[in-house]
Amino acid sequence: MDGNGRWAQARNLPRTEGHKAGEHSLFEVVDGCLEAGVEWLTVYAFSTENWRRPKDEVRFLINFNEEILLRRRDELNERGVRIRFIGRRDWRVPKRLIKRMDEASELTRHNRKLTFTIAFNYGGRAEIVDAVREIAASGVNPKKITEKTIAKHLYDAEMPDPDLVIRTSGEFRISNFLLWQLAYSELIFTDTPWPEFQREQLFAAIGDYQERERRFGGVDSGS
Ligand code: IPE
Ligand code: MG
């Protein structure tokens, strides 16, 4: 969900106004997924690198995430959305926010229409490091370690590899998002800043995805 700050700055607004405007986009995308039958949606809300931002912005993002969880959890629950989180739960994440995360996951855990995963204090490399630590601690024979072993130790072992990744706001980077999982994902980069990314843009991206031919390292299915 990139481009909030620049969207706001272009309007002479503080960066935090861009984050606020992004809430509408987020729920447009959730609605769009429910409508299109997308069953897994993962959003990058806060990275392990985002702590480097000015203190005020970090504080705003933490409070804003907490507030959204409180304000929107019932509505998400009623719509059949299962809320989950991936990321490191280290000392930097306030206990109160962790409590809200656990409450939202618990409240929605039986829902299956859409699994909506929020990556918070998430880093793809950190996730792989954490997986490797668990595997090493388990004392497994190194020869028995396969790709499946690593996948099983990621933050959410059930989450399928994404078919499609959309990055907004004209940046052409992965920025440490789901590094292991997106080995074969289709990537879409759009100039649209996150606050302007609505259902229509989501459907356009899905349409673009449907035109792509996925070979997973193999050859054309028709030839
Ligand atoms: C939101 O957009 C992403 C978050 C980390 C919350 P940005 O805050 O990265 O916006 P830009 O990239 O500065 O425009
Ligand atoms: Mg950014």
Image (cartoon, grey):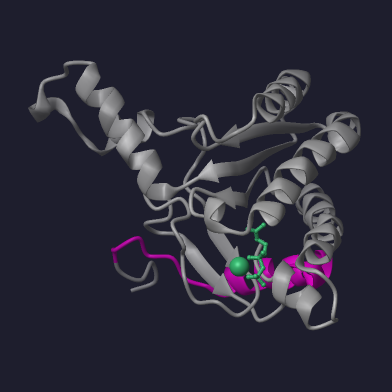
- Identify which residue is drawn at 83% across, 55% down: 23
> Which residues lie in the magenta part?
193-218
- Residue 193 visible to the viewer: no
Residue positioned most to the front:
55
Please state, as top left, top right, bottom left or bottom right, where the C terminus lies in the image. Answer: bottom left
Task: Examine the structure image and report whether residue 207 is included in the region drawn in magenta.
Answer: yes
Vertical order, 30 against 189 (above or below): above
169 relative to 64 in the view: left or right: left
Q: Quadrant of ligand 1?
A: bottom right
Residue found 40% across the figure and 34% down from its top: 154
Picture residue at 64% right of the left edge, 30% below the top: 94
Q: How many marks?
A: 0
Quadrant holding the N terminus: bottom right
Instruction: Say which quarter of the image contains residue 171.
Output: bottom right
Q: Nearer the viewer, residue 66 or 26?
A: 66
Q: Is residue 130 above or below residue 42?
A: above
Q: Indicate the position of residue 207 as horizontal and vertical percent values.
A: 68, 71
